[in-house]
Image (cartoon, grey):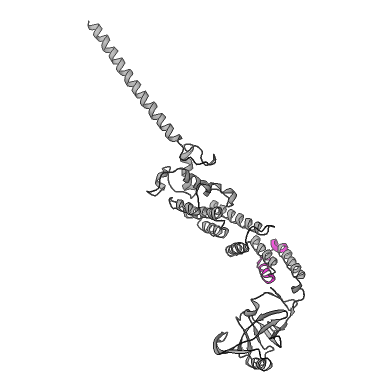
């Protein structure tokens, strides 16, 4: 009887141990399966490339820790804490932003990841939901300006801001690469047969680039070509003169000067030029008031108005009926300070075949021993593109 009882106790003990082992096994299996399914669950039904939606569990710690290393999204693998409290958890958006920020392209064809957002406003609002470094924020905004708005000027502004706040040399080099790529794209599109870029966009972007990088030869050459196309030979010459005359640039300068001469030679209005009279460091040109009275006026790019001496104004009033005294006395600024002057209006003022209607004329004090009757200022000259050839003492004007 005692033996039977002992055997029964051992059997019950073995059964109990078996039950406990089975329960633990079931618990571990359920826990493992649950964790596996959780890690494998997809955060979104949206279609993206395999690169963007690779297994979140694969190299997760390495990928997210790289955000901070590269100066991008700053946080650990706990992505939820990157959002504001009212923003839902989403692991796709941070991964897309990370990839965008580390992509070395600013061209729209390479920015398809931005289709995740519906508009520039939505994209900007999304950026505000994350802790993002200053250079990354400007970098991502630049890409958004290109993709959503096709605003290349605003994109270049953002890239220069990103470059200014770059966290390391590698980022600095990446931003410069994208700046050069954007400038090159706009330049090529502008000079293409279809001219896909407007004149306004081209000039704004190139002038900004020239301001930020004064010795950027491709930018200067592009501006020279632009002004040659428009017949702005004076401005084209000015940009050529800005190119540093070192050994590497001598061939470029020579070719641009040659092209400038060819353009001038092929333009009938530029072939002969208007003869100038040299007086010291100044040039004097013959001008005609009211298609009737010829005077000699000194070219003065620092003067806003055309002016003549009292003696000349008196003679003009005597010789032509086309002048009216519209204001008896007016304070005007001169190199010697403010002075009072009478203001007249004529019917026309012309230099060669270039004419301005209804010119305003100031009557000023000019010494009698001067070899000119007054000055012709920017009120006339600014109406045209003008260039002075100091070698031949000629003035070139063009519309």
Q: x and y percent of residue 317 in the render?
A: 65, 92
Seen as rendered, the residue at the extreme top is: 1
Residue that sits furthest to the left in the current view: 1
Magenta-colored span: 231-251
Query: Depth check: 199 or 275 in front?
Result: 199
Q: Look at 25% across and 9% down and name the residue there.
A: 6
Q: Residue at x 68, y 72 (%)?
A: 234
**Residue found at x 41% / y 32%:** 35
- Determine which quarter of the picture holds residue 207: bottom right
Q: Is residue 42 left or right of residue 6?
A: right
Q: Nearer the viewer, residue 135 or 55?
A: 55
Whether residue 47 sits left or right of residue 244 in the image: it is: left
Residue 159 x, y percent position in the rendering: 54, 57
Q: Main secondary structure of the magenta part?
A: helix
Give the camera-side residue of 331 and 215.
331
Q: Is residue 357 visible?
A: yes
Q: What x and y, as percent, mark residue 299? A: 67, 81
Residue 188 figure quarter: bottom right
Instruction: Pick the quarter of the image with the C terminus.
Output: bottom right
- The image shows residue 97 at horizontal and vertical percentages of 49, 48
- Res. 167 visible in picture: no
Q: In the visual, does 355 lie left or right of 77?
A: right
Q: How many marks?
A: 0
Work out whether residue 146 or residue 262 is closer to the camera in this orientation and state it.
146
Asked whether, in this view, residue 260 is left or right of residue 147, the answer is: right
Residue 248 on the magenta span: yes
Quadrant of the image containing the N terminus = top left
Magenta stretch holds residue 92: no
């Amino acid at each position: 009887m005692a033996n039977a009882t002992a055997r029964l106790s051992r059997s019950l003990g073995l059964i109990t141990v078996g039950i406990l082992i089975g329960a633990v096994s079931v618990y571990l299996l359920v826990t493992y399966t649950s964790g596996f399914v959780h890690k494998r669950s997809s955060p979104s039904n949206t279609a993206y490339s395999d690169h963007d939606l690779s297994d979140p569990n694969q190299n997760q710690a390495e990928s997210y820790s790289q955000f901070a290393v590269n100066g991008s999204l700053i946080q650990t693998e706990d992505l939820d804490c990157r959002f504001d409290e009212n923003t839902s958890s989403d692991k796709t958006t941070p991964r897309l932003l990370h990839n965008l920020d580390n992509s070395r392209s600013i061209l729209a064809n390479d920015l398809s990841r931005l289709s995740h957002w519906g508009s520039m406003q939505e994209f900007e609002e999304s950026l505000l939901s994350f802790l993002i470094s200053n250079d990354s924020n400007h970098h991502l905004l630049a890409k958004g300006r290109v993709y959503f708005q096709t605003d290349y000027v605003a994109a270049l502004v953002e890239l220069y801001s990103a470059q200014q706040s770059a966290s390391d040399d590698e980022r600095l080099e990446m931003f410069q690469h994208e700046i050069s790529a954007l400038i090159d794209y706009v330049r090529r599109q502008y000079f293409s047969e279809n001219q896909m870029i407007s004149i306004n966009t081209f000039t704004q972007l190139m002038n900004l680039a020239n301001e930020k990088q004064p010795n950027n030869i491709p930018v200067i050459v592009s501006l020279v070509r632009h002004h040659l196309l428009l017949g702005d030979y004076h401005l084209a010459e000015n940009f050529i003169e800005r190119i540093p005359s070192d050994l590497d640039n001598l061939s470029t300068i020579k070719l641009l000067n040659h092209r400038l001469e060819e353009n001038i030679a092929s333009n009938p209005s530029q072939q002969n030029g208007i003869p100038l009279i040299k007086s010291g460091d100044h040039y004097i040109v013959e001008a005609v008031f009211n298609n009737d009275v010829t005077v000699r006026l000194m070219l003065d790019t620092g003067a806003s108005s055309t002016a003549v001496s009292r003696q000349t104004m008196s003679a003009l009033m005597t010789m032509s009926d086309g002048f009216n005294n519209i204001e008896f006395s007016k304070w005007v600024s001169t190199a010697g300070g403010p002075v009072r002057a009478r203001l007249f209006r004529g019917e026309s003022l012309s230099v060669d075949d270039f004419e301005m209607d209804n010119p305003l004329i100031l009557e000023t004090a000019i010494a009698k021993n001067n070899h000119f009757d007054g000055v012709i200022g920017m009120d006339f000259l600014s109406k045209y593109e003008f260039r002075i050839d100091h070698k031949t003492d000629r003035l070139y004007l063009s519309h």
